[in-house]
């Protein structure tokens, strides 16, 4: 009876996993079709002839090389910024004692309930006043820190024994030395998790780059993919081909860094 129940559970999980993979398979299939096959009914799952040329054509129809450089710069800056600023804030909230510390942290957590779209207009007005439109500053400045990243690292820092810090203080180490040489090296799983999320969030961001840039040479990959759609038509084959290429770096990074992701979630203290 137990084996039958386990088999049923596994079958349900496999079906659910298949539904999650179906959009990706459809995207790859569309990327390999001809223009006529895309609009055929009933729709085809696999094309008659695999048009691998769609990928090279899609990447040459727009300056995707420039888009890739822009996205890489913004993503790397976002990762470095969040690792630095979030870790410093998390160390302060988890280790330092100051007035209203818990109330300030609770206020930070409360901002997670505010939809990002609410802060979009104020953020745009600030960027516009600073004269940062169509610059890298406009693209990555809002992503240099995140409340979720501070929360994640704070929870992890609290699992580190305080005896290590007390011993360092006896030896005359400053707070920054303790943070830099003791806490950060012991927090690689959580830092890796934050880096993965920061990179993925910045790499696939669409709305903010669309708003703060209107020059072709400052667009990111996601905005470039949207360029295959116009008011009257959409070039589905080349759009899906470009989407597959843009998705590959995220998939590769996640495959090689998933062990850090799992360790970070396991030991970050999110389980309570």
Image (spheres, rainbow, N blue to C red):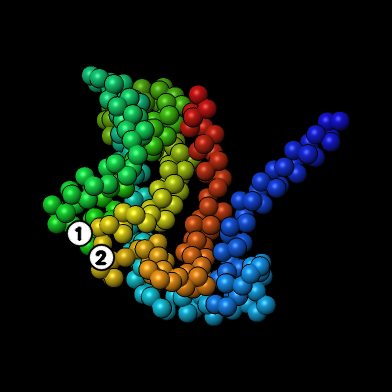
**Relative to 73, does residue 10 appear above or below in the rendering?**
above
Q: Residue pushed farthest right?
A: 1
Residue 202 location (% of width, % of height): 38, 53
48 and 230: which one is in front?
Answer: 230
The residue identified by callout 1 is 133
Q: Which mark is residue 214?
A: 2
Q: Nearer the viewer, residue 94 or 138?
A: 138
**Can residue 173 be seen?**
no
Can you give x and y, in whole percent of width and height, for residue 262 in the image? Answer: 55, 41
Question: Taking 67 as reference, is 74 above or below it?
Answer: above
Asked if marks 1 and 2 touch (Cβ < 8 Å), the reply is: yes
Q: Position of residue 177 (x, y in %)?
A: 30, 35
Say few, some or many: other residues with alpha carbon within 10 Å of mark 1 (under 14 / 14 to 19 / 20 or more).
some
Give the foreground label among 1 and 2.
Answer: 2
Q: Earlier in the sequence, mark 1 or mark 2?
A: 1
* Element class at badge 2: loop
Q: Secondary structure at mark 1?
A: loop
Query: Is residue 64 toward the left or the right of residue 270 in the image?
Result: left
> Looking at the image, can residue 59 be seen?
yes
The answer to whether residue 21 is above or below residue 194 is: below
Residue at 66%, 67% (x, y): give it.
42
């Amino acid at each position: 009876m137990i084996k039958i129940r386990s088999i049923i559970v596994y079958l349900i999980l496999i079906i659910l996993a298949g539904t999650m993979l179906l959009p990706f398979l459809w995207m790859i299939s569309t990327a390999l079709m001809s223009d006529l096959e895309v609009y055929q009914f009933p729709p085809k799952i696999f094309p008659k002839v695999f048009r691998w040329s769609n990928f090279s054509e899609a990447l040459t129809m727009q300056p995707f090389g420039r888009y890739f450089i822009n996205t890489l710069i913004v993503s790397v800056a976002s990762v470095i910024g969040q690792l630095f600023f979030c870790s410093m804030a998390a160390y302060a909230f988890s280790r330092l004692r100051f007035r209203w510390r818990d109330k300030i942290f609770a206020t930070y957590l409360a901002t997670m309930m505010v939809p990002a779209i609410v802060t979009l207009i104020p953020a745009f007005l600030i960027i516009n006043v600073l004269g940062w439109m169509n610059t890298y500053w406009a693209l990555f400045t809002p992503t240099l820190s995140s409340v979720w990243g501070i929360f994640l690292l704070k929870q992890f820092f609290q699992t580190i024994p305080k005896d290590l810090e007390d011993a360092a203080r006896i030896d005359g180490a400053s707070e920054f030395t303790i943070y830099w040489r003791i806490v950060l090296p012991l927090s690689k799983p959580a830092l890796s998790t934050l880096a993965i999320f920061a990179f993925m969030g910045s790499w696939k961001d669409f709305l903010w780059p669309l708003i703060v840039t209107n020059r072709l040479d400052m667009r990111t990959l996601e905005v470039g993919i949207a360029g295959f759609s116009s008011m009257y038509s959409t070039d589905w084959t080349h759009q899906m081909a470009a989407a597959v290429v843009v998705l590959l770096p995220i998939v590769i990074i996640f495959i090689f860094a998933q062990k850090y992701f799992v360790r970070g979630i396991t030991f970050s203290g999110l389980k309570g």
